[in-house]
Image (cartoon, grey):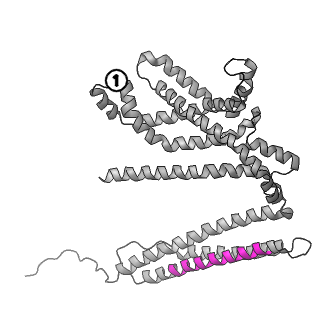
Amino acid sequence: MTSSAGPAEAPVSAGASRLSPPPRAVALAWAALATAIVLIVWAGVLGGALAYSAAGALSVPGLAIGLTGAALGAGIAWYAARGLRLGLSARRRDAGGGDGDRLAARELAAKSRVHSFGAFSTSLALVLLLALVVLLTANDASIIDTFFNLDYMLRSALDVTSAFGLNIVIALGAMAFVLVFGLVLAVVRMIPGDGARPLRALAIAYIDVMRAIPSIIVLYLIGFGLPLAGFPLFSGLPPAWYAIIALTLTYSAYVAEIYRAGIESVHPSQTGAARSLGLSYGRTLRHVVLPQAVRTVIPPLLSAFIALQKDTALVNIIGAVDAFSQAKFFASSNFNLSSVAVVAVLFVLITIPQARLVDWLLARDATRRRTRRTR
């Protein structure tokens, strides 16, 4: 008695792999290597052109630029060649056909692509850097002499740095007032109920108008308008106070929106729970909502204060002798802008640490949120 059998299944080869093939890596690696080689040639030609640009005389800086570019290009080519070797190894392993070989091939191909993309990005960065160097050294390094003359920078550094103290004072004073006034605006804008509608409308109008007017216009109006008006409380103030008032009026509008975003980020259940315990709206805002909101908005607040610090350089339009004003005096008397570069360096020195602090706070907040989700 013969038994019936179903349709025969196609046999699976012992060496066949059920995994997807590795990503293409060899062609990308060849392109990265070719780009690095072209970069080496271009750097060599550029170095030669710079080395003999001055009437046939050998220029040591130009030769150094060319040799440095060629050496860096050689390093990139070596890195790209490693990617090519990994890509070829991935192709050979994938030819085996088994799951183990294909897994190894996928890993090798991924590493090859990392090397190739790294070589591409480094080549682009090196090209931009060399282009910047060529721009700075062109025309007998006239740009360096105009903006970064070390002698003029050292001669003006003491006076500019001393005047920079006024920028710091204005920034700190404005920050203190902005923190308070911005919070008041945010709270007034978010008062619930129909009875507070006029106050909300007034706060919204103020925020919209002050965010629409450039800071320099507000500073000009306050710095010259208040003394011309002859108002008793504001007619005899020093220019630094006019700058603090103007920056406070402007940046309070921005900070109010930052506060509002932080308040709205607090879950409504927090407010509902506090009100169910008998807390008034004001006490709920003070003890429950604002402590959570302020912790949330610290990074964007710091970003706003970085912008405020930079706008302190505008105070020279109302006669305040800050770092920029002092640098302009020195530049006009020496027909050189290196003193202004000192001002730029001072702002960079106080701004970049704050920017890194913002990044650290954001990263810490993201880590805390991930930790809460995993609990």
Residue at the extreme left: 1
Q: Quadrant of residue 311?
A: top right
Main secondary structure type of the part rendered in magenta: helix
Magenta highlight range = 63-86
At 43% from the left and 23% from the top, the residue drawn is 191
Residue situated in front as seen by the camera: 274 or 127: 274
Q: Is residue 256 above or below residue 60?
A: above
Residue at the extreme top: 195
Position of residue 19 measured from the top left corner of the image (x, y, whole percent): 37, 73
At 22% from the left and 75% from the top, the residue drawn is 7
Kind of residue indicated by mark 1: Ser
Dot 1 crowding, Cα within 10 Å, few <14, some 14–19, many 20+: few
Position of residue 293 measured from the top left corner of the image (x, y, whole percent): 43, 37
Give the residue pinned by disc 1.
280
At 86% from the left and 45% from the top, the residue drawn is 332
Q: Is residue 337 magenta?
A: no
